[in-house]
Image: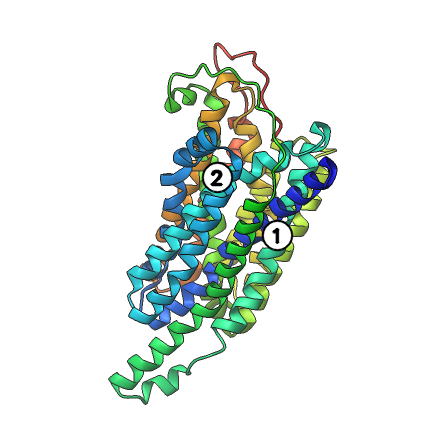
């Protein structure tokens, strides 16, 4: 196998990682209503699914970067895949023992693997090949996240949500029979995660067998004193805040959709899962459309416009009724599509020697996905109306709009002249 063929194979395997972690993330919205029902949880308690996942990003962001620096990308990717697979297989004893906390531990382990994979795959896809086409390669690879967002809810709902009893049937059962029935429903989550775990181990084996092309270092001279020293860059501080609120908004919208849509529009969970797939398609189309628009409109301005459109649609999601609320949320997914990569790129701009630490801080800010959906759930439970939970994404988009208009501007007395990498 020549160098060109090896590079192509490596890129195909790297691209598969984007799809796989996108698929895992987009199974979470299917898990939430199933576990909420099986363990008789409040909406706030059900959002611990997201907390378990996104706390891992905060905990593992710096260790993942250190692992890559010490042992290389190949070891990092294989380690991430094995952790990912281990978490998937933990769903079997979790379902067998019927402990909600066991499910949360399994999700935390999965997310630890995902953190390592994302830390490795994003820069590796960028530099694997001609440097002039790095941005295009990364955008192409990231598009598979959108594909997974479209497919996972449709596939997962038909494996997990179609088996079970109606609420009326459960009411007629004895307490023992009802517990057995709900336990059987919770066990439906095992099969998709077992299959996913097997696929992950096969891909880890392929990575172990091939020789990954070496990549050049970014060429930065490390001069930052410590990770929080990077926050002297005002635009990075704004970027960390914007990313925190963005991820919180995205997780609130996607993960709670299967609880939101049946109440706001009166549709079934299966139908809601199909519309969640439509949200994924809108997200994918929005990413391509946003990339094209950035040729004409400056990224921070487009980011601000998209944030304003999203917060206006949040008002429809809060005060509307019927299918218009579902269409509003699909619209929000379209406008959210460019936010993560755009905030990331603007946040690390002109950081010089602080670039690596700045990147770690932006990854750590993903912890917003663990905190803000909990607030969404608390508002929903306190008011008895899940639509009011959209107050949380509304506030998030206000912060993002401010970042797009003024917070992104580079502001520091002394900025390193070292070039920043292309993200």
Q: On the image, numbered disc 1 is attached to which residue? A: 146
Q: What residue is shown at x 51% (from left), y 53% (from top)?
A: 315
Marks 2,1: beta carbons within 8 A: no
Query: Distance from label 2 to label 1 (Cα)?
Result: 24 Å
In this view, the residue in front, 275 or 393, is 275
Q: Quadrant of the C terminus?
A: top right
Task: Point out which mark residue 245 bears.
Answer: none
Left or right of 172 on screen, residue 220: right
Question: Callout 1: helix, strand or loop?
Answer: helix
In this view, the residue in front, 299 or 265, is 299
> Residue 133: in sight, yes or no?
yes
Q: How is the image coloured?
A: rainbow
Q: What residue is shown at x 42% (from left), y 67% (from top)?
A: 33
Left or right of 140 on screen, residue 413: left
Task: Point out which mark residue 76 bears.
Answer: 2
Asked if residue 87 is positioned above or below residue 63 in the image, the reply reads below
Splitting the image into 4 quarters, where does residue 274 fall? bottom right
Q: Where residue 88 sits in the image (x, y, percent)?
A: 43, 59
Q: Where residue 11 sits in the image (x, y, percent)?
A: 65, 42
Q: What residue is shown at x 41% (from left), y 23% (from top)?
A: 231
Q: Quadrant of the N terminus?
A: top right
Question: Callout 2: helix, strand or loop?
Answer: helix
Q: Where residue 306 sits in the image (x, y, percent)?
A: 60, 42
> Residue 323: in sight, yes or no?
no
Local packing at callout 2 (Cα closer than 10 Å; few below 14, some 14-19, many 20+) is: many
Splitting the image into 4 quarters, where does residue 322 fall? bottom right
Local packing at callout 1 (Cα closer than 10 Å; few below 14, some 14-19, many 20+) is: many
Q: Where residue 324 sits in the image (x, y, percent)?
A: 58, 63
Splitting the image into 4 quarters, where does residue 9 fall? top right
Foreground tag (2 vs 1): 2
Q: Earlier in the sequence, mark 2 or mark 1?
A: 2
**Please, which residue is most extreme toward the left here?**
175
């Amino acid at each position: 196998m020549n160098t060109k063929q090896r590079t192509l194979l490596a890129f195909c395997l790297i691209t598969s990682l984007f799809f796989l972690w996108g698929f895992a993330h987009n199974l979470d919205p299917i898990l939430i209503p199933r576990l909420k029902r099986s363990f008789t949880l409040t909406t706030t308690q059900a959002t611990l699914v997201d907390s378990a996942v996104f706390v891992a990003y905060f905990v593992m962001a710096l260790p993942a970067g250190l692992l890559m620096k010490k042992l290389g990308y190949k070891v990092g990717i294989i380690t991430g895949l094995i952790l990912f697979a281990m978490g998937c297989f933990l769903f079997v004893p979790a379902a067998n023992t019927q402990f909600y906390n066991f499910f949360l531990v399994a999700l935390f382990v999965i997310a630890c693997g995902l953190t390592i994979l994302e830390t490795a795959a994003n820069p590796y896809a960028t530099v694997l090949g001609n440097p002039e086409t790095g941005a295009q390669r990364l955008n192409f690879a990231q598009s598979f996240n959108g594909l997974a967002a479209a497919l996972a809810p449709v596939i997962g709902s038909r494996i997990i949500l179609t088996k079970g009893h109606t609420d009326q049937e459960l009411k007629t059962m004895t307490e023992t029979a009802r517990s057995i029935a709900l336990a059987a429903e919770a066990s439906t989550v095992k099969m998709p995660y077992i299959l996913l775990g097997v696929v992950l181990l096969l891909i880890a084996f392929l990575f172990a067998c091939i020789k990954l092309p070496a990549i050049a270092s970014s060429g930065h001279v490390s001069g930052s004193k410590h990770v929080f020293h990077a926050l002297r860059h005002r635009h990075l501080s704004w970027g960390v805040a914007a990313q925190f609120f963005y991820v919180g908004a995205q997780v609130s919208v996607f993960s709670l959709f299967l609880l939101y849509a049946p109440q706001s529009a009166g549709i079934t969970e299966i139908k809601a899962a199909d519309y969640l797939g439509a949200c994924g398609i809108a997200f994918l189309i929005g990413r391509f459309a946003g990339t094209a628009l950035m040729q004409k409109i400056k990224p921070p301005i487009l980011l601000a416009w998209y944030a304003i459109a999203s917060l206006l649609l949040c008002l429809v999601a809060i005060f509307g009724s019927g299918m218009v609320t579902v269409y509003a949320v699909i619209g929000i997914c379209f406008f959210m599509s460019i936010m993560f990569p755009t905030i990331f790129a603007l946040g690390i701009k002109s950081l010089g020697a602080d670039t690596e630490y700045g990147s770690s801080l932006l990854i750590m800010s993903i912890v917003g996905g663990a905190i803000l959906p909990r607030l969404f759930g608390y508002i929903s439970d306190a008011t008895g109306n899940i639509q009011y939970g959209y107050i949380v994404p509304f506030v998030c988009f206000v912060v993002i709009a401010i970042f797009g208009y003024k917070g992104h501007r580079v502001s520091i007395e002394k900025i390193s002249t070292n070039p920043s990498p292309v993200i």
